Image: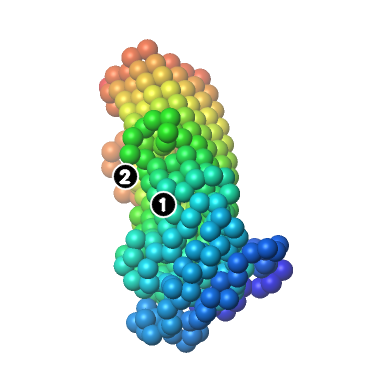
Amino acid sequence: MPTVAPLWVLLLVTVALAASAEDAQPAPRAPWPQHTPTPPFINAADFGLQPCSPDRLKVEDFHTNPDSTTALQAALDAGAGAVVYIPAGQYRVTAPLRIQTGTTVMGAGYNATMLLTEKPIPAILHAKGVGGPMTVIRDLWTCGPIGGNWQATGIWLEGCNGVTVRDCWVSALETGIRVDGISDTWLRNIVFELNQHGIVVKCPELSWASGNLRLLDCYGYQNYQTGITLEKCRGVQVSDCSAVGSGTFLQARDCAQMTITGSQVNWDASPWRKFGLRLEGCDYVTASGNVIEGMVEYGVAAVDCRHLTLTGNVIRNTQGGPGLIIERCEVASVTANSVTESASDGIRVGGCRYLSLTGNVVDAYGQGAGLTAQAAGLRVTAPCLDCELNGNLVRSADNGAPATAGLEAP
């Protein structure tokens, strides 16, 4: 397997330093193999591509590199509905590259083919209104120059149907991947790193037309505000994703029929990490088998949700607040979760209706430094209607912090 080029290391380390991430390290992933597609395909090299100079990749002099936008767009137009191959190299882009229906845009590998921009453009790659299962973006890297570009997006899917983005890297941008309106959209094996927002998916309204989004085996690293943002999406599967040091791992608003499974969120020294998973106004949501560790404000929060299932999750080392928060939810089952080492309360619930909170384990809560108010393993902040809270194992803090064992209710 080929090794990562020195440019890869230089770009990530330099961008991390520019963003004041003192402890940032490259994401712990081996590079995907470099390759070329099986003929026939359109080779963008035949349209006059001009790679960037290796000594002009910093943001202050990146504009002096040749512009490959015209050559790349010509290749995409010539290969509409076919495979367009962009060979290894770093290429400067100054305007959105338009992708047509049925086109596969393929690089030589995320660590080999790089599309960079220093311009405040809507996107480096833009697919608008395309349809069909054969529209694919794969094996390339979209990013800002060394130092970052906080006014551009890497990949933008606008009102598309049946698009797959796979084996790609997006970094040092305002938004890594933006999806406006979904229908059978797949994001698979994506690394989103050192962006303001990693992946943002929004639909204009919650309807059957806004359905079927898959986020599979994606990895986020130090996205300063949010890792994954979902709004008004239906039929969402988030599986085996992970994140380190992002402001938020996953934030979902007004979504329906969503499952979040097998994801892992780890902590590092990043000061911007806030919470792991936040669900607001969602309906029919299941989160199971996830590990959320080291968040600053809280681990998991569900607010104003209906038909909610949280089971088998591990939430630990929440450094500034409760491990798990359930507020104003209706028809919710919270079972068999493990909440340990919370700075204040272990589990906090309030204002719920038809809530079953059973079989959870809360251990070593009230660990916050300088904690003055009493912490509770399980705290009810507002009356709940027809709620079952029993069979939970609560063990108090053992570090001398003020704590009350068991249930604390108004």
Instruction: Please give the count of numbered marks on the rendered protein.
Output: 2
Instruction: Tell me the quarter of the picture where residue 85 sits.
Output: bottom right
- Quadrant showing the C terminus: top left
User: Looking at the picture, does residue 59 appear above or below residue 272?
Assistant: below
User: Looking at the picture, does residue 185 appear above or below residue 61?
Assistant: above
Q: Residues within 10 Å of mark 1 (few under 14, many from 20)?
A: some
The x, y position of residue 168, in whole percent, is 55, 60
**First of labels 1, 2 by sequence position:** 1
* Residue type (three-letter) at the residue carrying disc 1: Lys
At horizontal 33% and vertical 35% (from top left) the residue drawn is 205
Quick check: 395 left or right of 319?
A: right
Residue 128: mark: 1
At horizontal 52% and vertical 48% (from top left) the residue drawn is 163
- Seen as rendered, the residue at the extreme top is 386
User: Looking at the picture, does residue 200 appear above or below residue 83?
Assistant: above
* Residue type (three-letter) at the residue carrying disc 2: Leu
Quick check: 402 left or right of 75?
A: left
Instruction: Tell me the quarter of the picture where residue 288 sits.
Output: top right
Q: Is residue 278 visible?
A: no
At horizontal 40% and vertical 42% (from top left) the residue drawn is 181
Residue annotated with mark 2: 371
User: Looking at the picture, does residue 326 appear above or below residue 48?
Assistant: above
At horizontal 37% and vertical 43% (from top left) the residue drawn is 202
